[in-house]
Amino acid sequence: MPKRIIEDFTGVKKEIKCIGCAITEAGKNVSGYIIETDLFHAHQDYENPISGFVVLSTKRHIKSFDEFTDEEAAEFIALVRKIRKAQREVLGIEYVYFIQEEDTEDHFHMWFLPRYEWMNDVEKFGRKVSSARPVLQFAKTHMKTPENIVSVKEAAEKLRNYFDNLPSIDGRR
Ligand SMILES: [Zn+2]
């Protein structure tokens, strides 16, 4: 896999071969860390400064649901439900778009993209799911302000605290 330069949500550029491996290796030290189990890692989206935008990824290099082991399948749905609940209860996120692209060099990952009011600007971004890319591009280009970066980090911290105070999902904690 070739190396590529990616810019994180705070504006720091890094050269990375596989973002999934880099995040797995960094574990709890990832900026925007939320929760980790033996099989999965959840964190604030690496590149887009949108509060509460969670990415849940497998630690294994797989691309699709049909490659999940039974253990991964069970843990995945438990994590999806808990993360969505945390977005709602801790951050007040009413709607989320779930996106999972199989045609990626990265590990399997699911995007929990909050649907904020400002994203409903049809003229600017397009309608519903077709607005997802333009919204992300807008966030990358215009939302890396110091105030917004602080609020994105705070949102991730709140989600992390929520999970720190929950009973363990995989029996490790
Ligand atoms: Zn990898």
Image: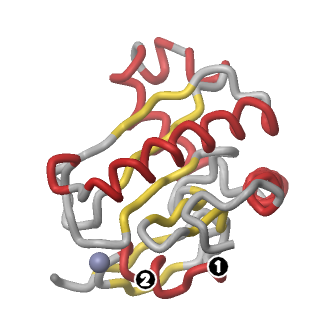
Task: Residue at 29%, 58% (x, y): give it.
Answer: 108
Can residue 148 be seen here? The reply is no
Residue 5: give x, y in percent of width and height: 37, 79
Number of numbered callouts drawn: 2
Residue closer to the observer: 101 or 11 = 101
Q: Is residue 38 left or right of residue 149?
A: left
Element class at badge 2? helix
Q: Nearer the viewer, residue 78 or 135?
A: 78
Q: Residue drawn 47% across and 28% down?
A: 97
Q: With respect to residue 123, does 158 lie above or below?
A: below
In the image, the residue with mark 2 has its CB under 8 Å from the nearest atom of ligand 1: yes
What kind of element bears circle 1?
Answer: helix
Is residue 86 in sight in this rendering?
yes
Residue 93 in the image, given as x and y percentages of width and height? 70, 28
In the displayed structure image, the side of residue 114 where residue 153 appears, left or right: right
Q: Give me the C-alpha separation between circle 1 and circle 2.
A: 12 Å
Which residue is labeled 1 in the image?
Answer: 28
Give the image quarter of residue 21. bottom left
**Mark 1 or mark 2, earlier in chain:** 2
Q: Amino acid at mark 2?
A: Ala
Dividing the image into 4 quarters, which one contains the N terminus? bottom left
The location of residue 122, given as percent across then percent down, is 48, 12
What residue does disc 2 label? 22
Amino acid type, callout 1: Lys
Left or right of 16 on screen, residue 121:
right
Q: For this view, does 73 lie left or right of residue 77?
A: left
When the figure is inspected, residue 13 is found, relative to residue 44, above or below; the finding is below
